[in-house]
Amino acid sequence: MINGFVQLSLTPILIGTLAACACALPGNFLVLRRQSLIGDAISHVALPGIVVAFLLTGTLAAWPMLLGAAASAIIAVGLIELIRRLGRIEPGAAMGVVFTTLFALGVLLIEQSDTSNVHLDVEHVLYGNLESLIWLRGTSWASLADPVALASLPPQLGRLALVLLAMVVFTVVLWKELVIGTFDAAFAASIGARPALSGFGLVVMVAVAAVAAFDAVGSIIVIAMFICPPAAARMMTDRIGPQVGWSLVFATISAILGYVLAGYGPLWLGGQHSVSAAGMIALVSGVILGLAALFGPRRRGTRQQA
């Protein structure tokens, strides 16, 4: 059973944890800036770019996917501005139209394209494919010291580790600019902290995290990783440093507990089949957020003051 865990469960849990933490880090600033839906919007807009990049290159490698997602984001911004000016409607309505239209276009492109040789279909797009990211040559814990076995690790593991490292470096290097720009953009500009530049960098990093997490949790459920752990952490403290720490703890718990419950929970209840790991991770994230909203110390303080 232990060897089976290494082969079938170790890498999906690690990949899920890395994806959750990589999304939770920038998610803290999205929540505090009241821009939570940016993560959702980017995940929707990125889909047609990812599909077109695959159709042009025939590969799901990281760089074509990122370039495709970036091109989609630029087109989306142009369309939003065009619709807003020509239709004279509010920006929120223009964004809603563009995001849903581009996402629908991505789904139609997938259905009409030959993607049978890769994990790129509508179900993969919606729910991810975490369960398939197993380590076939990881026959035991000793495989962790075997160079041949390590060479066969799922590429998503190394990719997400690099993305998480980039998120940590981005957060540490631009910590002052991000924090001041989050709470007082005018003051940040007055002291030369360049809030617009740090805000643009934050959106770029959100896009990178959304694309990197695509294989694990899809383009829909990834929004739970951006929002739920940081929002739950917000209920635990009023200080941003500890909030970031809490969000990483909640993200890790969600990924590990969600994967275990998805794989073994139905069997414990007498069922015959497991359920979607990405869906269960999102559900556990939501439950943690609900518990934090009910019992978190920051929430209790707000009630007492009211």
Image (spheres, rainbow, N blue to C red):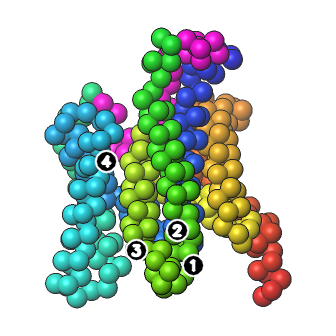
At label 4, the amino acid type is: Leu
Residue located beneath label 3 in the image: 196
Counting from the top left corner in percent of width and height, residue 53 is at: 22, 44
Task: Say what secondary structure mark 2 lies in.
Answer: helix
Q: Earlier in the sequence, mark 4 or mark 1?
A: 4
Q: Is residue 303 above or below residue 219?
A: below
Q: Is residue 235 above or below residue 269?
A: below
Q: How many marks?
A: 4
Residue located beneath label 2 in the image: 178
Q: Is residue 117 above or below residue 65?
A: above
Instruction: Tell whether label 3 touches label 1 (CB within 8 Å).
Output: no
**Mark pair 1, 2: CA separation:** 9 Å
Instruction: Tell whether label 3 touches label 2 (CB within 8 Å).
Output: no
Q: Earlier in the sequence, mark 2 or mark 4?
A: 4
Q: Which residues are magenta?
A: 118-146
Q: Nearer the viewer, residue 100 or 140?
A: 140
Q: Earlier in the sequence, mark 1 or mark 2?
A: 2
Q: Is residue 98 above or below residue 213?
A: below
Q: Residues within 10 Å of mark 2 (few under 14, many from 20)?
A: many
Left or right: 154, with 20 as reference point? left
> Is 91 covered by the magenta stretch?
no
Residue located beneath label 1 in the image: 183
For the N terminus, the image quarter is top right
Left or right: 59, with 172 as reference point? left
Residue located beneath label 4 in the image: 66
Q: Residues within 10 Å of mark 1 (few under 14, many from 20)?
A: few
Please say whether residue 40 is visible from this viewpoint: no
Q: Nearer the viewer, residue 66 or 8?
A: 66
